[in-house]
Amino acid sequence: MNKIRLKEFWSEILLEIRKKINEQTYQTWFSKTYPIELKENTLVIMTSTKFFADWLEQHYKILLEEIAYKIVQEKICIRFDSEDKEVKRVSQSFNKSGRLKGYELKLNARYTFDSFVVGNSNRFAHSAAMAVARNQGRVYNPLFIYGDTGLGKTHLMQAIGHYLYNKKNVHVFYTSAEDFTNEMIFAIQKNKMTKFRTKYRNFDALLIDDIQFLSKKEGSQEEFFHTFNTLYNSKKQIVITCDRAPKSITDLQDRLISRFECGLLTDLQPPEYETRVAILKKKIEDEKMLSPEKKVNLKQEVINFIAENFYTNVRELEGSYIRILAYSSSNMIDPESLDVEQVKQILKDMMMKKKKLISLELIHEEVANFYGLRKRQLIQDTRKHEVVFPRQIAMYFSEYLLSISQKEIAKYYHRKDHSTVIYAKKMVKKKMAEDKEFKNELEELRKYIEN
C-alpha cells in the first residue's frame, strides 16, 4: 500500500468513477480534486470549497471507498477537505465603530432558514429562531435550543448566524463549547488570556454549540460565565444549543443554569411522519438543483417507506436517501426505478440496527401494555372489539417489523391460518388511512416496540 504513489492511486480511482457517472457530473465534482495525504489507510482528498467537500462526502464516499478497496484489496477510508475549510468572512482587526473583526464566521452554507423544513415538531423553535434573527439582542436572550442529536439544533443556530451577518451585517461568531475550552487552554498556555477575553466579549452575537461539553470543566464554566455576563449586559445576542435542558446537565454551576434559563428554552422533537416526507422531498429538490443532469427521484411509495422506518432524527432520514443514491450510482440504475422491496435490501444494514432485538414476544407484550390488556387476552378466542383490534395491530406489527411468514404469526396468536393475518393487516391499514390520530397512535406504539 505504501508503495503506491498518491497521485496515481487517486487517478486510478477517478478513472473508475468516471465510468460510472456522466461526463458533466465528473467535470463538475471531480475534475478539480486532488489527493494530499494517505496515512493509516485514510486518504484525504482536497476540494475547492467546503460545500464541494460536504457534497462529495454525502454522495460519493461509499462508492469511492468500494472502488479503492477493489484496487488495493484493503479498506480505505476517504475523507474530503477543502481549500477554504469553511465559509470565511475575514476583515481587519477593528472597524470604525470599534467592533472586533478578523475572525472567521464558520458557518455551513447549507444551514439557512430557507433550507429548514418546518413541522409540528420544530415549529416553535423555528419561530423563536426567526424572532431572534429579526430582533437580535432584544427578544429571547439567551435563546437555548435543546434536543437529541440530528434534529436540527445546529441548523437553526447557524441559520440565525447567516441571517444576522447577511441581512444586518452583525458581527457574529459561531463555535462549539469544546472549541471554546480548547482555545482557552491554549490561551492559558501561551499567556494570551487577555486576547482570548477581548475576542469573545466583543461580538454582537455569540453562537455556542453543544454547551453540555462544559460539564465537569470548572475553569471553562467560570470563564464562560463571565463572557456570558459581559455580552448579556451589553445587550449582545447569545444562542446556545444542547442535547438536554439546562437543569439536566450534570456538574454544571447553578449560576450558569440560571443564566441559561433567563431567556427562552425551546426543544426540538423527532419529526412526525408528514414532516419526514417533506424533508425527503426537500432533499430530492436540493439534489436536482445541485445536479440537474443526475437522476435523484424516488417513487412516492419508497419515500413513504423511508419516512415510516427512519423517524428518530433528520440525519438518519437523509442518510438513508444518500445510501440509495450511492447504490444507484454504483450500479448505474435510476433510483426512481427502485421499489420498496429493493430499497429494503439496500437499507437492510441500517434497518437491522433497529430491529435486531424485536421478537414476536416483545411485540405481543408491548401491544398488550399499550392497550391495557393482559398478554393472554390477545391469544384468547374472543370477538370483543377491545381485544380483537389490538390483536390485529399486534399481527400487523409482527409482519411489518419482522422477517417471518404470515403463517408463523397466525400460529403464534392461535389463529387457524394466515388469512387472519391478511385481514388484520387490511383492517389496520384502512383505519390508518381514515384516521390521522390512529396513525399517530401507532407511530407512538412502534417507538415503544423498537426502543
Image: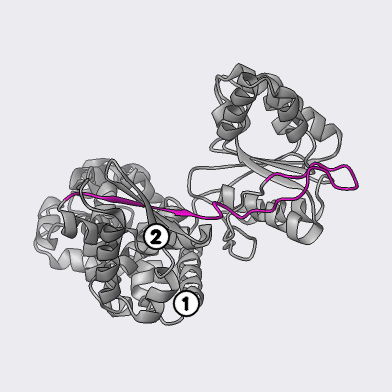
Residue 116 position within the rendered picture, expressed as x and y whole percent measured from the top left:
59, 61
Mark 2, Cα crowd under 10 Å, few <14 / some 14-19 / many 20+, is some
Residue 185 falls left or right of residue 238: left
Q: Front-most of 394 and 70? A: 70
When asked about the image quadrant of residue 320, the answer is bottom left
Q: Is residue 68 above or below residue 176?
A: below
| Distance in Å between CA atoms under marks 2 and 1 | 26 Å
When asked about the image quadrant of residue 115, the answer is bottom right
Residue drawn at (72%, 56%) of the image: 130
Q: Earlier in the sequence, mark 2 or mark 1?
A: 2
Is 80 included in the stretch rendered in magenta? yes
Amino acid on which disc 2 is placed: Tyr
Tell me the tag on residue 288: 1
Q: Which residues are magenta?
A: 74-103
Residue 434 position within the rendered picture, expressed as x and y whole percent measured from the top left:
43, 71
Residue picked out by circle 2: 34
Q: Front-most of 44 and 117? A: 44
Mark 1, Cα crowd under 10 Å, few <14 / some 14-19 / many 20+, is some
Label 2 close to label 1 by CB (< 8 Å): no
Q: Secondary structure beneath disc 1? A: helix
Q: Front-most of 303 and 180? A: 180
Residue 380 falls left or right of residue 427: left
Residue drawn at (38%, 64%) of the image: 59
Residue 245 position within the rendered picture, expressed as x and y whole percent measured from the top left:
59, 34
When asked about the image quadrant of residue 142, the answer is top right
Q: Secondary structure beneath disc 2? A: strand
Amino acid on which disc 1 is placed: Lys
Residue 413 position within the rendered picture, expressed as x and y whole percent measured from the top left:
16, 52
**Can residue 212 be seen by looking at this rendering?**
yes
